[in-house]
Amino acid sequence: MNLFNEKNTSFLYEYLNNASPTGAEKSGQKIWSSFIKPFVDEIHLDIYGTCYGVVNPGKEFKVVLESHADEISWFINHISDDGFLRVIRNGGSDHAIAPAKRVNIHTPKGIVKGVFGWPAIHTRRGTKAKLSASLENIFIDVGAKNKKEVEKMGIHVGCIATFEDEITEINKKYFAGRSLDNKMGGFVLAQVAQYLKNEKIELPYSLYLVNSVQEEVGLRGAEMIAQTIRPNVAIVTDVTHDTHTPLVEPKVHGQVKCGDGPTVTYAPAVHSKLIDLACKTAEENKIPYQREASSRSTGTDTDAFAYSNGGTPSILLSLPLRYMHTTVEMAHKDDIENLVKWIIACLKELDPKTDFRYFVP
């Protein structure tokens, strides 16, 4: 599998470098749907922007393979008289990393450049020596002298701001940048679709490749599309934490490491028969994988699918990620490739005749 050939890498860079903030994922969905179009039989879009391609449509048994398309960002919430912008979160944005970051403000007139300002170290004396960022004191500077000039630029309350950052390679082993959570999942789905088409693999069910919106604000896109498709099985892929970096404690957050393979999560929402299938498939195909556990909920779209339509057998296969919700999220190339291989192997093994009941009364 030549996963990172010129064509795929070009798509990866275009897709991840494009901003797809929660609630405004349209441009990213256009890029994603354009890439998968040759590899699927149908493409659909729901009214809130979730995009999905269908392979082998019309079968009674339906399998969803899902990732989420949105990335964290900021809403402009207030414009001061002297031209500075205050923000609120759009998703799980981290205020601690905001100071001194460049931003793109998305306006009806186009992109406006700005920066998250921060007082110079020289001015942080005395009680301000240890000044730290908080949601209450971060602000965006667009170089305007007053509120009127800001508004003339096209900026208004409700505009979205995204960090200006581009994907890069680290040590020829990692990709690093913003929005790997979880547009890297969209890349994985696209590679699965391409492989199935190129290898002429026929599945005994309809496969729905779903790129959901609004995961970062409560799994909302997955909730909606689960009701639309009403799948029999859902395979969800997202990112998870590499716990082997400084300041992270494996004893608390679990033992997961980039380069050691994608993970399968044990949680109430994750169906045990699908876990058994995934683990067996990985071992038979010599695909490295890791295990982790989540208490109560997974915090991913898995929960939305699992508890929809009276219950949908669901599983979560995740990509280890360093520095989640920052502009330097890092994922290992081997883990990305092994996640693609694992999903393909699971799709081949999945039998529509499986009785997913835990036991027959």
Image (tube, rainbow, N blue to C red):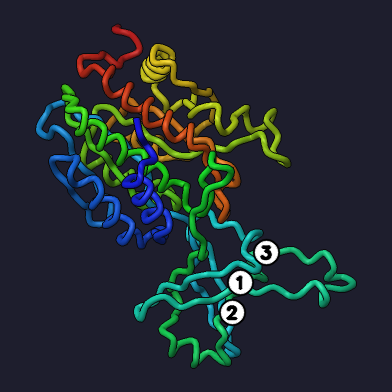
Quarter that holds the C terminus: top left
Quarter that holds the N terminus: top left
How many marks on residues?
Answer: 3
Amino acid marked by disc 2 = Asp
**Residue mark closest to the camera, 3 vs 2:** 2
Marks 2/1 in contact by CB < 8 Å: the verdict is yes
State the CA–CA distance, disc 3 to disc 1.
12 Å
State the CA–CA distance, disc 2 to disc 1.
6 Å
Marks 3/2 in contact by CB < 8 Å: the verdict is no
For residue 162, side relative to residue 226 (left or right): right
Q: Compare marks 3 and 1 and give the one earlier in the sequence.
A: 1
Amino acid marked by disc 3 = Ser
Q: Which residue is mark 3?
A: 134
Q: Compare marks 3 and 2 and give the one earlier in the sequence.
A: 3
**Residue mark closest to the camera, 3 vs 1:** 1
Above or below, 134 relative to 107: above
Query: Which mark is drawn over residue 141?
Result: 2
State the CA–CA distance, disc 3 to disc 2.
16 Å
Above or below, 52 relative to 352: below
Query: Which mark is drawn over residue 220?
Result: none
Q: Which residue is mark 1?
A: 116
Q: Residue at x 56, y 78 (%)?
A: 85
Dot 3 falls on a residue whose secondary structure is loop
Q: Residue at x 21, y 33 (%)?
A: 198
Q: Residue at x 17, y 28 (%)?
A: 200
Q: Position of residue 275 (x, y in %)?
A: 41, 19
Badge 3: residue crowd in 10 Å (few <14, some 14–19, many ≥20): some
Q: Position of residue 360 (x, y in %)?
A: 29, 7
Q: Nearer the viewer, residue 332 or 302?
A: 332
